[in-house]
Image (spheres, rainbow, N blue to C red):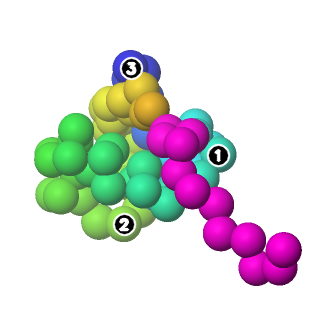
Amino acid sequence: MTIYTSKDGETLDYIVWKHYGKTAGILEQVLVQNRHLAGYDAVLPAGVQITLPDIVQDTNKQKIKMWQ
C-alpha cells in the first residue's frame, strides 16, 4: 500500500494510471479505499491523501483468440 499526496490540478484517474499503468478495474478499487474522495471535484487540489492499495491482478484469465 502506498499513500500518495495529490498535486494541484491532478485527477484520480491520472494518478491511478501513473501508479499502476492502467485504470480499468483498478480505479474502482482505489475509490473503495478512499471514500473521502467523493467530496472532491474531478480535479483535485494539492495535498489530498490517497491510499493506493496493492492490486493483485488475475493472471489466470482466459484469453480470447480471434483467429486460431
State which mark lies toward you, 2 or 3.
Answer: 3
Residue at the extreme bottom of the image, as rendered: 66
For label 3, the residue is: 1
Give the amino acid type for the residue marked by disc 1 in the picture.
Gly
Q: Secondary structure at mark 3?
A: loop
Q: Is residue 63 magenta?
A: yes
For label 2, the residue is: 42
Residue situated in front as seen by the camera: 55 or 40:
55
Provide residue 44's location: percent of width, then percent of height: 38, 54
Q: Secondary structure at mark 2?
A: loop
Looking at marks 1 and 3 on the same chain, the residue that comes earlier in the sequence is marked by: 3
Give the amino acid type for the residue marked by disc 2 in the picture.
Ala
CB contact under 8 Å: marks 1 and 2: no
Please identify the quadrant where the N terminus is shown: top left
For label 1, the residue is: 21
Report whether residue 57 is seen. Answer: yes
Report whether residue 14 is seen. Answer: no
Q: CA distance from mark 1 to mark 2?
A: 19 Å
- At label 2, counting other C-alpha atoms closer than 10 Å, the crowd grade (few under 14, some 14-19, many 20 or more) is few
Looking at the magenta stretch, what is its main secondary structure? loop
Residue situated in front as seen by the camera: 65 or 57:
65
State which mark lies toward you, 1 or 2.
Answer: 1
The span picked out in magenta is 57-68
- At label 3, counting other C-alpha atoms closer than 10 Å, the crowd grade (few under 14, some 14-19, many 20 or more) is few
- At label 1, counting other C-alpha atoms closer than 10 Å, the crowd grade (few under 14, some 14-19, many 20 or more) is few
Give the amino acid type for the residue marked by disc 3 in the picture.
Met
